[in-house]
Amino acid sequence: MEKIINIDWLSFFCECGDIVNFDNYTLEPKNYGTQIFEKMADVIKYNEVVATVLWQPRSNILPENSAMIKIKNRQLYNGKWYQIFTDIADNWFCHHFKISRIDICADFIAFKNGLHPKTLISNFLTQKFVKVGRGTFKVMGDQKKYINYQYLRFGAGSSAVSAYLYNKSAEMREVRDKPYIREQWQNLKNSNNSDVWRLEFSIKGKSLKILDIINGNYIIDNFEALTDREIIANIFSFMTKKYFSFVIPEAQQNKSRWQKLELFNNNDCHYKIVDFSKKSDTTKKHKVFLTNLVALEQEMRALKSYARDIIQCVAMDYAEEHNLVDYMDRKKQLVKHFD
C-alpha cells in the first residue's frame, strides 16, 4: 500500500439539550473549565474515554445551549467514531452542527518514485523544488554529522489550512506511542523497517466549505460522508494539490510551465473551496466587536488548540454574517505584525 489515509482530529460545535449520562456513556467532569466554557468532561464508554465535551458558555456571544465536542483520537482510527457521534447526538438532542476543525493525514514511507521526505525538505530549502503559492513555513530537525530534517510546516496555527510533513515514527518514539496507529502501518510496504512519515492537513474556518462541483454538495458539512474512505482520500488529494504542490525550476521564466512534482498517485476529484459570505449591513460596532474577538484569539495562545478553535470559529461566523472576512484577515495580519 502506498499510503494510509485517516482522520486524525474531529471537533465540532452544536446546540444540545441536557448533557447527562445515558446507556453505556458516563460523564467524568473536570474540576475546571476554559475561558469559553464553564464545564468540561470526558465522555466514558466501557472504561475508555471516547470524547471530550465543553458546555455552558461564559459569554452570551454563544447560545446558552452551545457545546463543543471533540472525538478522541483512537476512535477516529478504529472506525467507531461515527457510532459515538450518533449516540451523543441522539441522546443529548444535538442540532445545528458545525465542524470546527478536521485533520486529514496520510502515512507513508516515501513519495512517488522513491523520493524521501527528507530529500523533499532539503530540495525545497535549496530551491531545487519550488512550492506553488506563497506563505510562511517552518522547518525543524537536528544537526550532528549531517543535518537531519524531521518536520516541515506551511501555514501558521491560526491559518484556515496548515500542512505538516513530519517523521511520525520519530514523534511516537520521542513523545507518545500509539499502538493503534502502528497496527495500521502493517499494511504499508516496509520491508526495510524504515521510519513512517506523515503529511497532514489541519482544516478549519472558511476552508471547511469544500464543494463537490459535480453534485453540488458541501463535503465536510456532512458527518456521514466522512465515514466514506473514498471521500476522505479525495479531500486529501485536493488538499495536496492546493496546499502542498511543488514544481521543478526550469530555464524558462514562466513558472506555470515548470514541471510539476508528483508526490502521490492521487485520486481524481472535482472539489473547490467556496468563498461564501452572507451579505448584511456593516456598522462600526460590528467591526469593533470583531476586532475584540481577533485580539482575544491572540491573547489566548496558551490554550489547548480546540479551545482556540472556538474563538476562531465564532469570529469567522460573525465575519461572514456581516461581510467582514477581508477586514478580519487584515486585523489578524496587523496584530501579528505588532506582536
Image (spheres, rainbow, N blue to C red):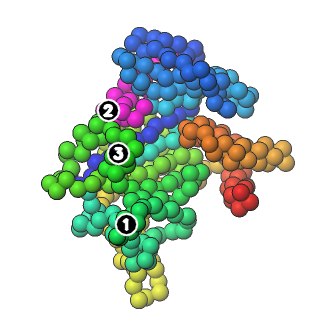
Q: Which residue is mark 1?
A: 144
Residue 241 shows up from this direction = no
Q: Which residue is mark 3?
A: 172
Task: Residue 188: give x, y in percent of width and height.
Answer: 21, 50
Real-space CA distance between mark 2 and mark 3, rounded to the nearest whole angstrom: 21 Å
Task: Residue 83: give x, y in percent of width and height.
Answer: 37, 25
Point out the frontmost of discs 1 and 2: 1
Kind of residue at disc 3: Met
Real-space CA distance between mark 1 and mark 2, rounded to the nearest whole angstrom: 41 Å
Kind of residue at disc 1: Lys
**Foreground pick, 126 / 21:** 126
Residue pictured at 56% horizontal, 39% vertical:
304
Residue pictured at 67% horizontal, 32% vertical:
35
SS state under label 1: loop
Task: Farthest residue to the left: give it.
Answer: 191
Residue 311 shows up from this direction = yes
Q: Main secondary structure of the magenta part?
A: helix
Task: Residue 137: give x, y in percent of width and height.
Answer: 52, 63
SS state under label 2: loop
Q: Is disc 1 surrounded by few (<14), some (14 to 19) or many (20+) residues within 10 Å?
A: few
Residue 149 sits in quarter: bottom left
Residue pictured at 71% horizontal, 27% vertical:
58
Task: Farthest residue to the right: give it.
Answer: 284
Residue 167 lies in the magenta stretch? no
Residue 86 lies in the magenta stretch? yes
Q: Please report the bounds of the magenta region as a residue range.
A: 72-93
Q: Are marks 1 and 3 in contact (CB under 8 Å)?
A: no
Mark 1 or mark 2, earlier in chain: 2
Task: Residue 157: give x, y in percent of width and height.
Answer: 56, 51
Q: Which residue is mark 2?
A: 79
Kind of residue at disc 2: Gly
SS state under label 3: helix
